[in-house]
Amino acid sequence: MSMGGFFSSKKQDSGILPYVRQTAVLVAVVTFVAASVFIGGAINAAHAGSNNESSSSFYENPITGEVFLKPGSGRTKLSKHITKKLFGIKKAVSNAVPAWTKHVKLGTTIWIGYGYYNNTGFSQDLQLEENRPGPGNNNYNAFNVNRGYINLVFRKNKKWFLRVTPNIHRGQDGSAFIRLKYAYLQFNKIYNANGLTMNLKVGQTTTPLVAWEDGLLGYHFTERTPYGFLGVTSTQPGISITGRYKTGGRVYMAYNAGFFNSGGWHNNEEAEQKSPQIRLDIYPFGADSKLNGIGISGYYAWAQQNTFFPAGENHPTARAAAILHYKTPDSVIVLQYDYAINQLGGFGNINDSKGSWCGIGANTSSPGVYGCNLSGASLPFNPSKLGTSPHNTEHGIDAFGYYNIPNSKFGLFGLIQRYYYSTPQADSANFKYGNPYDFQRVVAGIGYHFNKHITFAIDEQNYRFLNAKDYRDRPSTSAMYINYGQWMGDTNAILVQVRIAF
């Protein structure tokens, strides 16, 4: 193991006093020791399995000035006097740093990329935390920093740990700001008997479905889960339990259940009632510790209040899913059926839940040019009228997965999602050609795993309204064309993304 990266001299000593060289050695090692203490490490290799510091040695290349922990060609052993000084400095630096820092792990996750939209229409964002313009802005393109995490984990033992994750997020006006994504305390195995384990999480933590499916996607940094695309969050404040049932070395059941705020993690609570959520996974043939195998999962969540409804009207929101999944070390395939009440997501609420948006026609004073409507008015293509029914039902079918080619750094991934809204009786005449908000989303891409820290991906994503043609073909003066058809263009993009995680 070499420490030569900290300092090096290409010239001979040429009469320079040995004291100068010894001082340089001390400075270099102090730098190395301080860095080691900061990241919670130590120069354990120098001890060579011994607790006796005097038995450890440093070796110097007198030509280059490099210092090593092991002997080698052209290296001379430093005197015991210098070695003792080095370990004395190491002890002093270690004592100056609080002991708890040795139990802190610091990490980061960054998503960066480039997006080219040959078509811009009304849809949810195709990838997380992008702020693209609305309809009428074809060939829009931009470099993006979609996510920046700073992961702080304090773990002193296996019984519990604390995670805090600030998220660097880009707002509607393009400014970057920090908001809290995770902040929770987890107690491991509060119950552990007869093969069943239970962990307890308290704080702002992962919800049962979306965060779990983020992992199944394999390429979450460039695509969104089915319910995630519909606006369901992966993180909410609350309390939850997670665990598994394992016997004979195989996992046969896993679960995640809890009570959470209805308001998500990036806004205030919306109701006095809390949101119960649960996911139960059954592995009929057993799965290994990484849950490779065939699984059948069920998910249910209920919440009160929906911001699409008029103020003062408390309507419930419910979501359910039945999921069949098969996972191997190199691949995942998932088939999913969704059923929801008053979910009302997936359509073109561009940038702001109040209805603000940018694009051709947004500026009501100049409807034929590009502008921004920031007044909070309703979108011209506005699905909130579906909320006039207190029991609007929705359902969807999804399939997604990936395949990492063995003995290769390349992988393939894809997703298809179809989602259907029921039609309120009052709107049946206007929705003569089917519900105009029914949509299909398709993702297809290729990934390249540069190393365990860096992954590249390029993909094409398309969002289209399933009944668009019939509405677009209506006469330009008809209500069906004015209200729906003229706004029902596809959204299509080519995205290049990089995920960096340390």
Image (cartoon, grey):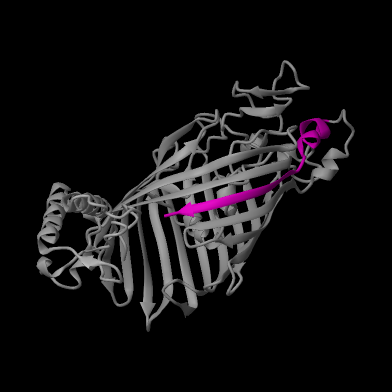
Q: For the point 12% across and 51% down, which residue is it?
A: 92
Horizontal side, residue 53 vs residue 371: left or right: left
Between 163 and 258, the one lying in front of the other is 163
Is residue 284 visible to us here?
A: yes
Horizontal side, residue 192 vs residue 283: left or right: left
Q: For the point 65% across and 54% down, which residue is it?
A: 458
Horizontal side, residue 108 vs residue 39: left or right: right
Q: Residue furthest bottom?
A: 248
Quadrant where the C terminus sits is bottom left
Relative height, residue 366 to residue 93 (above, below): above
Where in the figure is residue 440, as x and y percent of width and height?
71, 51
Between 3 and 9, the one lying in front of the other is 9
Between 223 and 186, the one lying in front of the other is 223
Is residue 486 shown in magenta?
yes
Between 354 and 351, the one lying in front of the other is 351
Is residue 363 shown in magenta?
no
Where in the figure is residue 121, as x and y percent of width and height?
72, 38
Where in the figure is residue 355, as x and y percent of width and height?
61, 29
Where in the figure is residue 474, as x and y percent of width and height?
88, 37
Quadrant where the N terminus sits is bottom left
Is residue 389 visible to us here?
A: no
Q: How many marks?
A: 0
Classify residue 72 by image quadrant.
bottom left
Horizontal side, residue 278 vs residue 385: left or right: left
Q: Residue furthest top?
A: 365
Relative height, residue 276 to residue 137 (above, below): below
Q: Residue furthest front?
A: 15
Classify residue 159 by image quadrant.
bottom left
Q: Which residues are magenta?
A: 479-502
